[in-house]
Image: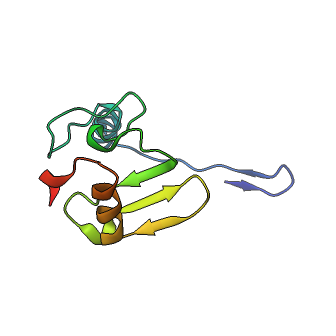
């Protein structure tokens, strides 16, 4: 129902129990600690992958999890690096990711 005078838009959504159960399960999975398929350790309390945690001057990082084109580093100065240069940077900076290559 739309009431333009009151600025109200109402709609009804009919969710089945199955849809609700599936949605709750996905939310539960997202809130669970993730185990790294490479090093076998769980993510940190901040949600970082254990084997690339606490990188110096890095805001966000991802090794690509085998898809090296998807790897990225976001530096605190605003610069972002993508792809194989990320893997090279990690190795050169002593990040133990040899088991990922």
Which residue is rendered at x = 29% and y = 48% of the image? Answer: 95
Q: Quadrant of the C terminus?
A: bottom left
Name the quarter where the N terminus is drawn. bottom right
**Residue located at (43% from left, 32% from top):** 46
**Residue 35 location (% of width, % of height):** 20, 37
Q: Nearer the viewer, residue 18 or 57?
A: 57
Q: Nearer the viewer, residue 79 or 93?
A: 93
Residue 19 lies in quadrant: top left
Asked whether, in this view, residue 41 is left or right of residue 73, the answer is left
The answer to whether residue 101 of the structure is visible from this angle is: yes
Q: For this rendering, which residue is in front, 8 or 60?
A: 60
- Residue 18, visible in the rendered structure: no
Q: Residue furthest right?
A: 5
Rendering coords of residue 69 (x, y %): 30, 72
Residue occupying image coordinates x 20% and y 41%: 36
Vertically, is 48 above or below 7?
above
Decide if residue 57 is on the left or right side of residue 97: right
Please state the total of marks drawn on the protein image. Answer: 0
Q: Quadrant of residue 79?
A: bottom right
């Amino acid at each position: 129902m739309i009431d333009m005078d009151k600025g109200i838009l109402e709609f009804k959504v009919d969710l089945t129990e199955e849809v609700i159960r599936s949605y709750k399960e996905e939310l539960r999975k997202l809130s669970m600690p993730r185990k790294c398929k490479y090093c076998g350790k769980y993510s940190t309390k901040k949600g970082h992958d254990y084997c690339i945690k606490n990188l110096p001057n890095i805001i966000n990082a991802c090794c690509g999890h085998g898809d090296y084109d998807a790897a990225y580093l976001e530096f605190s100065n605003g610069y972002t690096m993508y792809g194989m240069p990320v893997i090279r940077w990690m190795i050169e900076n002593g990040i133990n990711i040899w088991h990922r290559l």
